[in-house]
């Protein structure tokens, strides 16, 4: 009898251990980032193979089915047939409801994804992708689950700077894919800089024949240890821009272009010197910079930083030029918003420019204890351009410097110098996108020491835990003011990022942490749990062929 009892106990222990093992296997499989609001693991699994159909009726659902098939084909080597009727297989349904929430129900007979919007249905398929095994195979087992989910913030974005370094169309599309795979919905495209103008403007061909190219680039951290003496540049044709915008739209991503003004306009000034306050003065390299090639006349800058040669606020020809440029840019982007920069605009040239001083007198602008007259001239510049953009049915976004001297009436503020600008803008009843450099500047290195050159140069670093625990909506705002925080984004500035592999290395895994910070309120996040799910996510990076920190 004792022997039987002992055997029973041993069997019970073994059964318990087996159950724990099965539970853990299931828990490992549910490694979705950003983590859904609710995940319930059920018994069984769904088997996806070449004979599995996708049921899609509406135009959007067929588009989503095609995108899911594209993912399967790229990473598993097969795709599925799409049918318009049926209850088995993968069933996509888009409802007409508020928000971008979705549900995903998986059992042995079917996977049913229902979105409150087309974007919601698309986000459901991104969760399905993360339920797939990370190993390739022609038969894929998907755990039975019940998921309900919705994003916390409406604006979830990533910015790519192509001004300092140009990235080819294929990588821009891949960057958009990464945004989509993380359930983010805005791509902020920084297109113009002192170091290069990157978008074709047919009325001003020199913007790309001259302004898109520099005669060399500094080597190492600013001011550099020398110059590579290589002509460098590139630009996107309007046809390429349309193609990229359409590519993003299929993935429910809005592309917001940025045309910098009144500062960071060196590429345009090199092409059309009359845009400067002093067209006859040659471009001055920054102190200590090794220069390559021609030193006479206006040149595209070869080093990073902030430069005094900015768009002249005193000439009508400046505004004519910018309006002409926007007349070509705005139709390329269906987005309701266009970013016009407004940051880091030195006023030294305006202070000694006869045209700018005349404009100040004509407008009756006065300095005060807080700002100089030239600061208020920038406010005039931004507000004038805003009126023009509003007349085209669009609204502006600007960096938080546009707060100085009085904010344009309908402007959205992108707060980058910490959170202060966003808090001030919200209190002034303006819409805000938070992008504080100390939390979401992905050009900052990821550890205290970095082998490759970064903008922080082994000083400040931005670890993944800090990104993950970012409280996007500041506590100091009132309930009503918090509603004006549209969302947040991370920025990838590319002074020291010259190729796609380095870009991916700086993005990952921080982009995964960001996606969860934008999807879930801080009180609902758990970094230790995220780190466990991240181990599976890293295997997905490998599946995608993406480079990442800590590989």
Image (tube, rainbow, N blue to C red):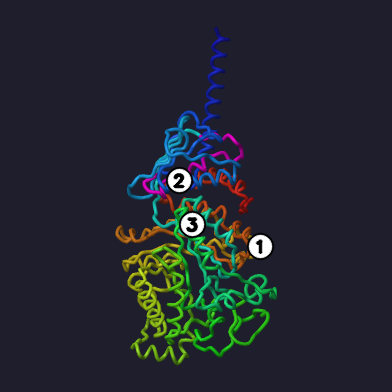
Of marks 2 and 1, the one in the foreground: 2
Q: The magenta stretch spans which residues? A: 115-142
What residue is shown with label 2? 62
Of label 2 and label 1, which has the lower sequence position? 2
Query: Looking at the picture, how far across and down is residue 148, in whole percent?
Result: 40, 41
Q: Which of the pair 125/323 is nearer the observer?
A: 323
Residue 166 can be seen in this image: yes
- Helix, strand, or loop for circle 2? helix
Of marks 3 and 2, the one in the foreground: 2
Question: Is the Cβ of the residue at disc 3 closer than 8 Å to that at disc 2?
Answer: no
User: So how many labels did they put on this image?
Assistant: 3
- Quote the CA–CA distance across marks 2 and 1: 44 Å
* Residue lying at 51% horizontally and 64% vertically, measured from the top left: 241
Q: Which of the pair 23/461 is nearer the observer?
A: 23
What residue is shown with label 3? 248
Q: Residue furthest front?
A: 84
Vertical position of residue 78 compared to residue 434: above or below: above
What residue is shown with label 1? 452
Query: Looking at the picture, how far across and down is residue 242, in whole percent?
Result: 49, 63
- Quote the CA–CA distance across marks 3 and 2: 16 Å
């Amino acid at each position: 009898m004792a022997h039987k009892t002992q055997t029973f106990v041993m069997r019970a222990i073994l059964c318990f251990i087996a159950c724990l093992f099965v539970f853990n296997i299931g828990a490992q499989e549910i490694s979705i980032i950003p983590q859904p609001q609710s995940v319930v693991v059920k018994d069984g699994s769904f088997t996806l193979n070449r004979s599995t159909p996708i049921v899609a009726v509406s135009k959007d659902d067929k588009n989503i089915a095609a995108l899911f098939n594209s993912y399967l084909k790229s990473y598993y080597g097969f795709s599925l047939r799409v049918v318009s009727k049926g209850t088995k297989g993968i069933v996509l349904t888009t409802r007409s409801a508020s928000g971008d929430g979705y549900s995903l129900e998986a059992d042995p007979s079917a996977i049913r994804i229902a979105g409150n919007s087309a974007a919601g249905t698309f986000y459901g398929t991104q969760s399905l992708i993360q339920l797939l095994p990370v190993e390739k195979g022609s038969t894929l087992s998907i755990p039975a689950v019940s998921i309900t989910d919705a994003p916390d913030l409406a604006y979830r974005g990533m910015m790519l700077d192509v001004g300092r370094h140009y990235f080819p169309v294929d990588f821009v599309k891949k960057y958009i894919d990464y945004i989509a795979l993380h359930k983010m919905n805005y791509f902020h495209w920084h297109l113009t800089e002192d170091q290069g103008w990157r978008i074709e403007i047919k009325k001003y061909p020199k913007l790309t024949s001259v302004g898109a190219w520099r005669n060399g680039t500094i080597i190492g951290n600013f001011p550099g240890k020398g110059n590579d003496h290589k002509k460098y540049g590139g630009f996107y044709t309007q046809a390429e821009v349309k193609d990229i915008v359409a590519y993003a739209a299929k993935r429910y991503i809005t592309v917001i272009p940025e045309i910098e003004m009144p500062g960071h306009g060196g590429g345009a000034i090199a092409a059309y010197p009359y845009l400067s306050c002093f067209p006859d003065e040659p471009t001055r390299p920054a102190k200590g910079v090794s220069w390559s090639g021609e030193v006479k006349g206006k040149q595209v800058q070869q080093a990073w930083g902030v430069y005094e040669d900015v768009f002249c606020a005193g000439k009508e020809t400046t505004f004519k030029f910018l309006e002409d440029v926007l007349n070509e840019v705005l139709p390329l982007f269906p987005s309701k918003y266009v970013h016009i920069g407004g940051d880091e605009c030195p006023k030294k040239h305006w202070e000694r420019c006869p045209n700018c001083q005349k404009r100040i007198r004509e407008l009756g602008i006065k300095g005060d204890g807080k700002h100089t007259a030239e600061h208020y001239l920038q406010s005039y510049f931004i507000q004038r351009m805003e009126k023009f953009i509003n007349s085209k049915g669009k609204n502006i976004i600007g960096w938080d410097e546009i707060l100085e001297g009085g904010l344009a009436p309908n402007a959205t503020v992108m707060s980058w110098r910490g959170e202060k600008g966003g808090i001030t803008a919200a209190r002034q009843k303006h819409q805000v996108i938070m992008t504080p450099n100390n939390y979401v500047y992905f050009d900052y290195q990821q550890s205290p020491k970095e082998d490759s050159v970064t903008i922080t140069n082994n000083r400040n670093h931005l670890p993944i835990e800090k990104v993950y625990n970012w409280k996007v909506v500041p506590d100091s705002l009132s309930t009503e003011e918090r509603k004006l925080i549209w969302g947040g984004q991370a920025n990838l500035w590319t002074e020291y990022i010259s190729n796609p592999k380095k870009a991916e290395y700086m993005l990952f895994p921080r982009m995964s942490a960001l996606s969860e910070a934008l999807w879930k309120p801080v009180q609902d996040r758990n970094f230790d749990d995220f780190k466990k799910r991240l181990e599976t996510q890293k295997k997905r990076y490998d599946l995608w062929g993406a480079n990442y920190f800590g590989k």
